[in-house]
Amino acid sequence: VSVARKNVEGRLLELVLAWKKETHFLSSSTAIVANPKYQEIIGLGDRAIPFLLEMLRDNEEPEFLFHALLSITEVNPVPAEHRGDWSAIAKDWVNWGIEEGYLESNAA
């Protein structure tokens, strides 16, 4: 694993932890995604995509990770019938990430 990859992953984890701490008691999804730490996550751009997808695969904060992925990629791989189904949406994003080469398949 490259040093640059470890640096991006480390920074992303720092930002996610700080963002969760700062937004823990907020109920407004608008305020949650407008948080400066969340905006920094989006600011990491393409470099953050593999890590965000890995977090989705691990079921961490899916509904908010979707927004970050949408903002970064400007892609929406989620069919209309999956809207509101966090598990299906996470699978759609993970499958997209595998197809686009951001993630390796877990299939043996």
Image (cartoon, grey):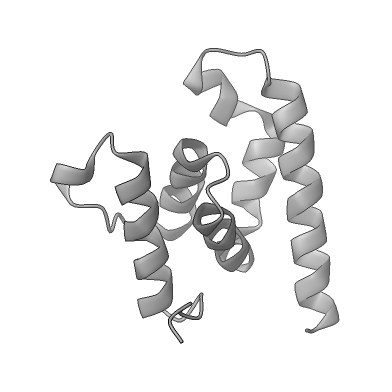
Quarter that holds the N terminus: bottom right
Report the label total. 0
Give x and y (percent) for residue 102. 50, 75
At 32% across and 59% down in the image, what residue appears? Answer: 92
Determine whether 65 is above or below 1 in the image: above
Q: Quadrant of residue 107?
A: bottom left
Does residue 101 appear to the left or right of 21 in the view shown? left
Work out whether 76 lies above or below 82.
below
Residue 11 is situated, as x and y percent measured from the top left of the image, at 80, 55
Which residue occupies the foreground of this view, 49 or 71? Answer: 49
Q: Residue at x 80, y 84 (%)?
A: 2
Instruction: Give left or right: position of 91 versus 58.
Output: left
Query: Residue 4 vs residue 26: left or right?
Result: right
Q: Position of residue 104 (x, y in %)?
A: 50, 81
Q: Is residue 63 left or right of residue 81?
A: right
For the point 56% across and 54% down, which residue is it?
58
- Location of residue 18 in the rendering, given as x and y in whole percent from the top left corner: 79, 35
Residue at image coords 45%, 48%? 71
- Residue 27, picture quadrant: top right
Q: Which residue is the extreme one toward the front? A: 108
